[in-house]
Image: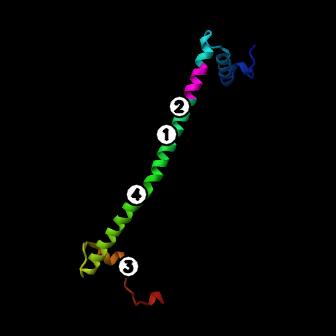
Amino acid sequence: MLDPNDPRRNAAWQAAQQWRARTRQTPGGPLGGLKLIFTWLLFGLLLIVGTLLGLFFLLIGWAMLPFVRHRMKKRLEQMRAEQARDAGSGYYYREETVYRDGRRHSEHELLEGDYQVRDDERGR
């Protein structure tokens, strides 16, 4: 009679036995070991080439940082100049109407924190 607790009936145990059987198989013929060594050497070479490429691109990125910083600095100066020119002209460059609480508000009033102080008894 078969024991239900027998490990040979367990699926995990059977899978482990199959893995053991596969690892015990030797590579086919005398060239099997040579193929294995060649595969490991190729894998190691690919790891070294990948590492060197990664370092190369890292150094290029670091070398480009001052140029990108200079470009961003120029763009920021240009935006500040446009903003100062718009603020000094006496009118809003782009006036958009926003409806809130049933009333018209301009975009700039809302962004600058337009508020009203109500004088009612609840707030005291």
Residue at the disc numbered 4: 68
Report the Cα–Cα distance between label 3 and label 2.
60 Å
Label number found at residue 117: none
Residues at discs 4 and 3 in contact (Cβ within 8 Å)? no
Per the image, label 2 sits on a secondary structure element best described as helix
In the rendering, at what x and y percent does residue 104 appear?
27, 77
**Badge 4 or badge 2: first in the primary sequence:** 2
Q: Rounded to the nearest whole Å, what is the CA distance between mark 4 and mark 2?
A: 32 Å
Q: Say which of 59 and 84 sits in front.
A: 59
**Left-right relation of 47 to 69:** right
Is residue 94 or residue 78 the one in the foreground?
Answer: 78
**Residue 96 lies in the magenta-colored region:** no
On the question of residue 66 being in view, the answer is: yes
State which region is magenta: 36-43
Residue matched to label 2:
46
Q: What amino acid type is highlighted by mark number 4?
A: Val
Question: Residue 7 appears in which quarter of the rendering?
Answer: top right
The magenta stretch spans residue 37:
yes
Q: Is residue 12 above or below residue 112?
A: above
Question: Disc 1 and disc 3: Cα gap in Å?
Answer: 52 Å
Label 3 is placed on what type of residue?
A: Gly
Is disc 1 surrounded by few (<14), some (14 to 19) or many (20+) residues within 10 Å? few
